[in-house]
Image (cartoon, helix red, strand yellow):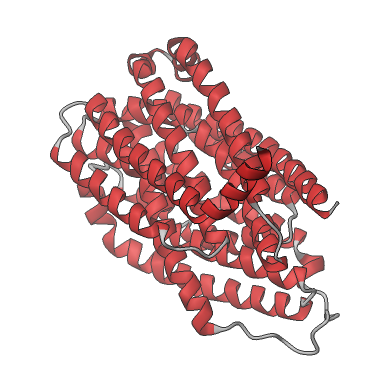
Amino acid sequence: MNGKILDSKQLIGSLAVSLGTILTGVFAYLFNVIIGRSLGPGHFGEIATVVYILTLVTSFGGVVQTIVTRYTSEFHAKQELFSLRRNYRKFSLFMLYVGICLVVLIIIIVPVLTRFFSLSDRISSAIALTSIVFALLMTVNRGALQGLQYFTRLSVVNVLEVVAKVAIAYVLIRMSFGLKGAATAILLAPVVAYIMSYIFLQKDMKGTEGGVELKEVPLNRKELLRYSLPIAWGMILLSLLYSIDVFVMKKFFSSVESGQYIAVSQVAKIILYLGIPIAGVMFPIITQQRITGEKHYKTLGLAVTLTLVVIGILLVFYKFYSAILIQKMWGEQFKEGSYLLLSSSVLAAIITMINLFVNYYLSIKNYNFLWALTLFTAVQFQMVMRNHQTINLVLEELRLANGLLLTALVLYYLFIKRAQLKTVFIRGK
């Protein structure tokens, strides 16, 4: 019965987060369209590159979000409410300090970044990148909402953030602020999201009543360090997988070519944006199952099934409607890049499955997968840096390297579960 409840909770949570992700994707698309149609492929490529740099820098925040999710889930499962609240405040204060330090660093290195990626507007880049403070604070709140399994509230916060971004960008661009208007929208949107998420967490994080513990249960610092370091490395590598194609295009191809590709990749990565929440829902549920000693292969199986369904539907759609889709979404000036949509979508699909298995291994605290993740990330960097004559060649190299990585992750799962799979197979016979 308990297993059925968890399966139902996972399905409902996945649907709630997926619905929120669809709405988030719609408004994120509107934001990109506003930038692309208003400013053209060149400037769109610039603002998209800045966003990916921001994503890579805040990958550290993703580590903290994963840690907060894990400990929130554990404290909540054990009803250690006082510890839950105290550690939430500690993580928030820590991320505030880190965010301020990173903003100072960013202000110093902005000239270097703009030269390396051929960005034309340093001020716009600096404005957008200073959003890192609230972006990092949001990772704590997202982790808390996820760990408490408030998936609907998490979806509302995510949708509100992109709605605010779209509204602010539209108004400022109409007022002729151009790139600076888009950058300001990127800066203010996480502020709006943080305020809403803070309101949603008031009841759980501001109460005074305790749980089963009489005083705060301190975090095991050594255990936290052992857990956070592999997560940090895994999240950084995942962020590189998400963004390496964009960085390569912006570095080695013209502003128009890179802008067209980035627009196409935004459509392709809808697969990734819909798949990531499924892994996000799976993570706290498997963490809880691990703590209580329950089997979790069904939870992983359901997550894999849902992800493959999303991938299959979108790949079929992209195969038959790529040209029409890009033209309708982005306009004539982006149509030339439509032939890249299917190739980019296959790459996004592979990375989506990699993300799912990485999150699974992190939730069960098995970090051996990092060897394969590190190796194949280094291999693909080497490949694309040496051979990047055409965009198609770059995509072929990335698909090959990531396909081998996914194969390694799946084979490792079959290896560590060989005894359990053998038992299931024998029973089936």
Q: Is residue 243 left or right of residue 386?
A: right
Q: Is residue 331 above or below residue 165?
A: above
Q: Position of residue 392 (x, y in %)?
A: 26, 24
Residue drawn 45% across the image and 31% down it: 266
Residue drawn 53% across the image and 30% down it: 29
Q: Nearer the viewer, residue 279 or 128?
A: 279
Q: Position of residue 418 (x, y in %)?
A: 52, 51
Q: Quadrant of the rendered structure where residue 342 is?
A: top left
Q: Nearer the viewer, residue 195 or 388?
A: 388
Q: Position of residue 417 (x, y in %)?
A: 54, 53
Q: Quadrant of the rendered structure where residue 16 is?
A: top right
Q: Quadrant of the rendered structure where residue 100 is?
A: bottom left
Q: How many marks?
A: 0
Residue 50 appears anywhere in the view: no
Residue 258 appears anywhere in the view: yes
Q: Position of residue 150 (x, y in %)?
A: 75, 54
Q: Is residue 402 left or right of residue 201?
A: left
Q: Is residue 267 above or below residue 46?
A: above
Q: Nearer the viewer, residue 88 or 47?
A: 88
Residue drawn 41% across the image and 51% down it: 238
Q: Is residue 375 left or right of residue 153?
A: left
Quadrant of the snapshot with the C terminus? top right
Q: Nearer the viewer, residue 110 or 138?
A: 138
- The residue most toward the bottom is 215
Q: Is residue 81 above or below residue 286?
A: below
